[in-house]
Structure formats: C-alpha cells, structure tokens
Image: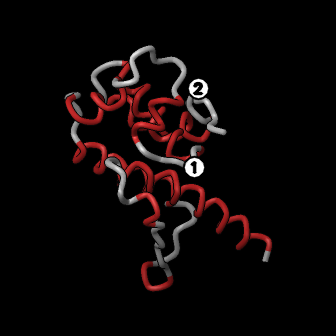
C-alpha cells in the first residue's frame, strides 16, 4: 500500500527551508518539498508514483512540469546544498586528514540527486554524531 503525501515530511520541512528563496513562488517550493518527501518515504520512488501519492495536487502532472519546465536552476540548488552542508557540519567536522564523507548513491538515478543526498547526509551525520558521543 502506498502512503499518501499529505504534507512534507518534518525532516524535509526543516532542511528545505534553506532552499526556499531559490524558487520563484510557493508552489515551486512545495513541489520541491513533496518530491523530497516522496524520495524519503515511498518504496517506489518514480516521478509517476510520487505524483500519484501527493494529495494536495489536483493535476498529477504538476510535479513533472516543475522538474522539466519550471525556471529553477540545479546549479543554484547544488551551490546552496554545499553551503548548507558546510554550515550544518561545521561544529562536528574534524580536520581534513581525520575525516571521511560517505555518500549514499542509492537515489542517484533521480533528477535532483543533490537534494536527495542532502537529506541522506544529514541523517547519516546525525546518527554518526550520536554514535560517537556515546562511545
């Protein structure tokens, strides 16, 4: 059974706020949040399936149009991702010689790879930080 997407996942809402000003309007930003939520919570991560599961959209092609024709730029999103990632990890990062950054490429076949990695990295860093502090 597929889960309906009623609202963006709380983790998405928390971290996606750093990207809000990149989008031209609140609808684009909402599609961005819904897409990330679909990548996180749905077992079938295809665009068609994510669109089917979004309940607040009467037109199931909205998400597809957002990805293919809306005026937002992947380079801007990626630049913001890097800035945000650096800001969020500054307090727990070790010197370069003692560090490793591991990427989970499970979602790389999707259009917004950089955004899905942001969520995955944030989760992994939180888990790693908690594990290291308990040792």
Q: Secondary structure at mark 1?
A: loop
Nearest to the observer: residue 44 or residue 21: 44
- Which mark is drawn over residue 7? 2
**Residue occupied by mark 1:** 43
The residue at the point 57 percent across, 44 percent down is 42
Label 2 vs label 1: CA separation?
17 Å
- Expressed as whole percent of the image width and height from the top left, the position of residue 125 reads 58, 63
Mark 2–mark 1 contact, CB under 8 Å? no
Q: Residue furthest right?
A: 134
Frontmost residue, 14 versus 110: 110
Q: How is the image coloured?
A: secondary structure
Q: Residue furthest bottom?
A: 97
Q: Residue at x 36, y 51 (%)?
A: 110
Front-most of residues 41 and 117: 41
Vertical comparison of 64 with 135: above or below: above
Residue drawn at (22%, 47%) of the image: 75
Q: Earlier in the sequence, mark 2 or mark 1?
A: 2
* Residue mark closest to the camera, 2 vs 1: 1
Task: Give coordinates of residue 107: x percent, y percent.
Answer: 43, 58
Q: Secondary structure at mark 2?
A: loop
């Amino acid at each position: 059974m597929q889960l309906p997407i009623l609202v963006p996942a709380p983790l998405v809402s928390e971290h996606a706020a750093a990207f809000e000003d990149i989008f031209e309007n609140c609808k684009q930003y909402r599609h961005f949040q819904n897409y990330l939520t679909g990548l996180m919570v749905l077992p079938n991560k295809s665009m068609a399936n994510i669109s089917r599961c979004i309940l607040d959209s009467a037109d199931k092609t909205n998400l597809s149009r957002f990805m293919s024709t809306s005026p937002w730029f992947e380079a801007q999103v990626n630049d913001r991702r890097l800035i945000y990632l650096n800001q969020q990890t500054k307090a727990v990062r070790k010197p370069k010689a003692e560090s490793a950054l591991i990427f989970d490429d499970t979602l790389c076949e999707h259009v917004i790879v950089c955004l899905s990695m942001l969520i995955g990295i944030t989760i992994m860093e939180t888990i790693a930080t908690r594990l290291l502090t308990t040792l």
